[in-house]
Image (cartoon, helix red, strand yellow):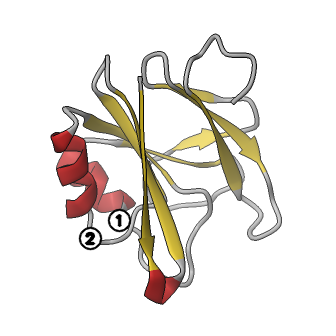
């Protein structure tokens, strides 16, 4: 079963997301804020472990918390396939998926905001015909 929560930081007009599968206990965070405590607390409250952290684009306007989640939760980092970064990450191109269990996250390359921009489709059930 999908667990999904948006976190919104009004002063930066920045939205981030936690998506998890309650059956497997696996979660991902998309575009985390620098203070990652809220994601760790929310995941813990639902019995989830954050194993994946995704940046939809490289953020020049604020510091993201992807490195903190990697270090504190042991999460793997994912960026769009066109990204250039000085740390290890898994590149995502259109159609690539991250399976949390029955919940599946699917990448779509959507360059425009930045060349490496991606969007993430969330499928509540991997067998569902639509996200």
The residue sitting at 44% across, 70% down in the picture is: 8
Q: Quadrant of residue 108?
A: top right
- Examine the rendered structure and indicate whether residue 41 appears above or below residue 10: above
Query: Which residue is at a point 50% across and 24% down the rendered structure image?
Result: 103
- Quarter of the rendering occupied by the C terminus: top right
Give the Cα distance between marks 1 and 2: 6 Å
* Local crowd size for mark 2, using a 10 Å CA cut-off: few (<14), some (14–19), many (≥20): some
Could you say where residue 91 lies in the image, as x and y percent from the top left? Answer: 60, 42
Rendered position, 19 above or below 15: above
- Which label belongs to residue 65? 1
State the residue in front, 82 or 45: 45
Are the residues flagged by discs 1 and 2 in contact, CB closer than 8 Å?
Answer: yes
Which x, y percent locates residue 23?
A: 32, 17
Rendered view: 59 above or below 17: below
- Looking at the image, which residue is at 24% across and 49% down? 42
Q: Secondary structure at mark 1?
A: loop
Q: Residue furthest bottom?
A: 11
Q: Quadrant of the N terminus?
A: top left
Quadrant in the picture for residue 113: bottom right
Q: Which residue is mark 2?
A: 35
């Amino acid at each position: 079963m999908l667990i999904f929560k948006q976190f919104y930081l009004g002063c930066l007009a920045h939205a981030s997301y936690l998506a998890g599968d309650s059956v497997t206990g696996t979660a991902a965070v998309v575009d985390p804020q620098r203070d990652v405590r809220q994601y760790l607390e929310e995941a813990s409250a639902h019995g989830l472990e954050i194993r994946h952290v995704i940046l939809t684009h490289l953020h020049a306007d604020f510091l993201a918390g992807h490195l903190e989640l990697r270090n504190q939760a042991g999460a793997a980092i994912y960026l769009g396939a066109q990204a250039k970064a000085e740390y290890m990450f898994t590149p995502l191109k259109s159609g690539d998926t991250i399976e949390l269990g029955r919940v599946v996250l699917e990448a779509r390359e959507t360059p425009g905001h930045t060349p490496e921009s991606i969007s993430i489709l969330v499928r509540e059930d991997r067998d569902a015909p639509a996200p």
